[in-house]
Image (cartoon, grey):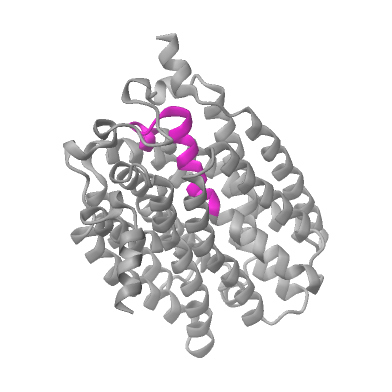
């Protein structure tokens, strides 16, 4: 056993040891906060039955939430660059616990909307922008693996919460589920954010160590203003719109769709939970792979699987295709977290990753807001999700085709100067 651990330690990359490893662990735990967004789908029927809301009313809560998240993302990128990740993660951990516990006290729809917004703001602070910036600066040669390991947190959190939440709701109440998860999350994440996360000292910045395999030299890095003038920025923004349209739509409606087709809620929630859990292997695997193949090949592979999942969705609830759908959907949606920041670094350099990523995340509002609302409206009007699922498949195919237009803009910008 000791020999196996020693071999594992020797195999672990040098640039992810010591303080860098503690930062990775702290960021991984903070990323578990993103898993809270998965809970609202499995607990949707409890709230709909108690309050009598329509599915469209419930899904529309995502719109002000995602609007705030999208608006906050560019500002968060700037603040991360100036203040560092730790204070943002600390504040966000507290806000998430307050927001989620607050849902346990709601009596009307507007209160749900308000707490959705607060939860969204907290998740933005715990999310890919702040964490991606600090981890990308600690890791150089193993940046893909580091991001993959850290982003596993959202999948571990989502897998755990989509099982614990419905279980508590079935044995106690949905209010107890929200209150318990809110308090427990803050108690777990806050110490890790405060004690483990640090920005690297100036001498350890990747730009001063020499560029990693994906990053151009520091002189070639583009800032946000320069990135806005490139086609790659708008391709990444457009494909993120399509991704969130599909991804958030399915988080909101997959369990409802499967229970409409006669599947027990525990089984339907387990399928969503399993898809989320697949992200653990997907993110680490894609991170490892992305350190060894061109980033554009990695993002094309990811969106190819995403497109395949939406085609399989059209054949559900065929039991023979449910497992292939869960596999493709779980792997592809999780890997997106890894390949997107790596592709941003490939296109624009690492120095201004946070502000550029924050600006691209503006796509979260129209994509993530309209996706679940569109699916709910189609169901409310037709009694079926088929039209929405067909739209998902078409948009994913267009996004996959658009990614062939990505290129390394940083080098082109340097040449122009």
- Residue 272 sits in which quadrant? bottom right
Q: Which residue occupies 52% across, 28% down? A: 233
Nearer to the camera, 46 or 240: 240
Q: Look at 45% across and 68% down and name the residue there.
A: 156
Which is nearer the eye, 245 or 393? 393
Residue range corresponding to the magenta coloring: 335-355
Nearest the eye: 217 or 368: 217
**Rendered image quadrant of residue 106:** bottom left
Q: Is residue 248 visible?
A: no
189 up-or-down from 301: above or below: below
Q: Report x, y in % for residue 16.
A: 30, 53
11 and 340: which is toward the camera: 11
Q: Is 342 contained in the magenta span?
A: yes
Which residue appears farthest toward the bottom when viewing the image? 171
x, y percent for residue 365: 53, 43
Q: Predominant secondary structure in magenta?
A: helix
Quadrant containing the N terminus in the rendered view = bottom left
Residue 211 coordinates in the image, percent (x, y):
34, 32
Q: Is residue 258 above or below residue 142?
A: below
């Amino acid at each position: 056993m000791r020999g196996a651990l020693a071999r594992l330690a020797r195999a672990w990359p040098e640039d992810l040891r010591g303080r860098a490893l503690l930062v990775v662990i702290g960021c991984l735990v903070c990323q578990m906060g993103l898993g809270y967004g998965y809970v609202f789908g499995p607990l949707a029927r409890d709230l709909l039955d108690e309050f009598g809301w329509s599915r469209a009313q419930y899904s529309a809560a995502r719109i002000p939430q995602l609007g705030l998240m999208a608006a906050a993302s560019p500002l968060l990128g700037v603040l991360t660059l100036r203040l560092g990740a730790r204070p943002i993660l600390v504040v966000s951990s507290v806000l998430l616990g307050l927001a989620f516990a607050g849902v346990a006290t709601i009596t009307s729809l507007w209160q749900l909307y308000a707490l959705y917004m607060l939860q969204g703001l907290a998740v933005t602070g715990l999310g890919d922008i702040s964490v991606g910036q600090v981890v990308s600066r600690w890791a150089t040669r193993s940046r893909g693996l580091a991001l993959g390991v850290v982003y596993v947190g959202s999948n571990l959190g989502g897998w755990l919460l989509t099982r614990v939440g419905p279980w508590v709701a079935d044995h106690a109440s949905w209010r107890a589920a929200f209150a318990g998860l809110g308090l427990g999350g803050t108690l777990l994440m806050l110490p890790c954010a405060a004690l483990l996360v640090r920005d690297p000292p100036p001498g350890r910045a990747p730009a001063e160590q020499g560029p990693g395999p994906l990053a151009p030299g520091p002189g070639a890095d583009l800032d946000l203003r320069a990135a806005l003038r490139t086609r790659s920025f708008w391709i990444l923004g457009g494909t993120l719109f399509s991704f969130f349209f599909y991804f958030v739509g399915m988080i909101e409606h997959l369990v409802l769709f499967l229970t409409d087709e006669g599947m027990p809620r525990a089984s339907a929630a387990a399928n969503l939970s399993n898809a989320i859990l697949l992200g653990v292997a997907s993110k680490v695997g894609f991170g490892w792979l992305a350190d060894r193949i061109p980033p554009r090949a990695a993002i094309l592979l990811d969106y190819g699987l995403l497109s395949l999942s939406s085609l399989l969705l059209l054949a559900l609830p065929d039991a023979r295709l449910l497992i292939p759908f869960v596999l493709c959907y779980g792997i592809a949606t999780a890997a997106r977290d890894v390949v997107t920041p790596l592709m941003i670094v490939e296109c624009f350099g690492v120095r201004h990753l946070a502000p550029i990523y924050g600006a691209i995340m503006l796509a979260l509002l129209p994509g993530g807001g309209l996706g679940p609302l569109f699916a709910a409206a189609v169901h409310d009007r037709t009694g079926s999700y088929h039209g929405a699922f067909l739209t998902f498949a078409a948009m994913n195919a267009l996004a996959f085709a658009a990614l062939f237009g990505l290129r390394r803009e940083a080098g082109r910008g340097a040449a122009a100067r």
